[in-house]
Image: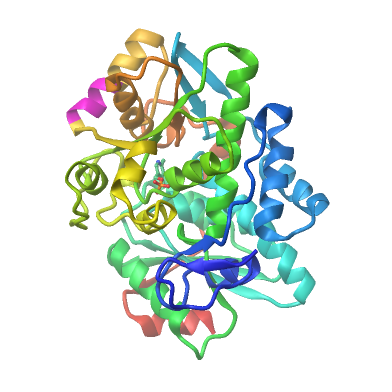
Amino acid sequence: MKFYSTNHIAQPVSFEGALFSGLAEDGGLYMPGSFGAPLSFSYYRDSIEATAILLKRFTGIPKSDLLSIVRAAFDFPVPLVQLDRHLFVLELFHGPTLSFKDFGARFMARCFQYYLMKRKRSVTIVVATSGDTGSAVAAAFYRVPRVRVVVLYPFGRVSALQEKQMTTFGHNIHAIAVRGDFDDCQRLAKRALADLSLSNMSSANSINIGRLLPQMYYYFFGYMQLMHDFSGIGTPLFVVPSGNFGNVAAGLFARRLGLPVTHMLAAVNRNSVVPKYLAAGTFRAAKTRMTLSSAMDVGNPSNWARIMDLYGLSRAAIARDLSAATISESMTKKTIARIRAQYGYIVDPHTAVGLAAAMQSEFRGAKIVLATAHPAKFISTVPIPCRLRSVLHKREHKITIDAHYAALRDLCI
Ligand SMILES: *Cc1c(COP(=O)(O)O)cnc(C)c1O
């Protein structure tokens, strides 16, 4: 299958081409050329197998190889927790770095490894991060042969745990603290990718189709668990805490592939470009506003171009499958307290945005809220899981640079 650019100028490429280039040459995002016939999900008992069968359509990687890639990438639990009769939380934070970004990063790392072995070549992956992406990518690519990772993060602007998660690997992971903000990091990363004098550069940011496609897995798994443990409850509504809208895009892909979903609800913080678009019809990128759910502080959601393309640029068509709700900061805090008091369950601020939207929704059937981060990552009173505590004592390997391209270039040669 070929992947085309949402800008429709660049030539379509294979999955391998889309994986290694990230963004299309015309600045568009890669989309699958077709989705094929819907899969009958009631037929499959195992969501790993269903995922491998679907990913084979898109990637062309043989099913046996895909099964081992998917099994190894998703080797941690994804529990569906029932809070109330119709309210469920799908915990996506049991991977090595405690956020759902582990799904995309771990699958993508294994795809890179698969092709690099075949082609006998090597690659330098540059990634700019405000926290969660950097640690997920670093953990996923750690000690992967033929891969060098350069992680750029803003000096003094990530949490202590996040910094430890990126800087204590060493080996093939190069952590670089940039004296500047996240936008400086992103600018430097883009410049390195466009620098033709550097060879074999690649990116691992969230617009890479290799991170998006595997995220369909947990929608299948959530649905299958619901059908298995709560049969008769009916087709669910998925509620997705959203920033760049990659997670929502993966859910809409899953729906296009036949996953029974009543509707999708995107929950955002004060960065509410998408709810405004769905209500008023004009898409206006805005300046990013800082909130408690920092990983969702996005003023211009990059994956929205994919969703527009998927629905032929029709707002009415999008609105039939997707709604969006804006949750205020005070509502987020109230929801954290309310969920703890009512259900004895502790959520992080990102998941709280999703839960607030779910509780406001008038939908009467089963609602599955995606829990995108472990509460320990953002709430200091929640203990960090044992397996992560050891990083706090490990030695950091990092380089600090000014936000000038020359400093980064020297490190990438
Ligand atoms: C990245 C992130 C999000 C937003 O996901 P998108 O796919 O960008 O919409 C939500 N929650 C957490 C914890 C994240 O790290």
Vertical arrangement, residue 231 with respect to residue 373, above or below? above
Magenta segment includes 333: yes
Which percent across, then down, holds residue 172?
A: 62, 66
Q: Is residue 393 visible?
A: no
Name the foreground residue: 264 vs 161. Answer: 264
Vertical arrangement, residue 71 with respect to residue 13, above or below? above
Question: Residue, x 53% and y 78% (percent of image)?
Answer: 11
Name the foreground residue: 257 vs 99. Answer: 257
Question: Residue, x 73% and y 31% (percent of image)?
Answer: 44
Range drawn in magenta: 330-335
Vertical arrangement, residue 62 with respect to residue 290, above or below? below
Which percent across, then down, holds residue 232?
A: 57, 11
| Quarter residue 240 falls in | top left
User: Is residue 345 rendered to the left or right of residue 48?
Assistant: left
Magenta segment includes 235: no
Question: Residue, x 26% and y 46% (percent of image)?
Answer: 274
User: Is residue 91 rendered to the left or right of residue 289?
Assistant: right
Q: Quadrant of the N terminus?
A: bottom right
Which percent across, then down, holds residue 198?
A: 53, 86
Q: Is residue 18 visible?
A: yes
Q: Quadrant of the C terminus?
A: bottom right
Name the foreground residue: 197 vs 363. Answer: 363
- For ligand 1, give the image quadrant: top left
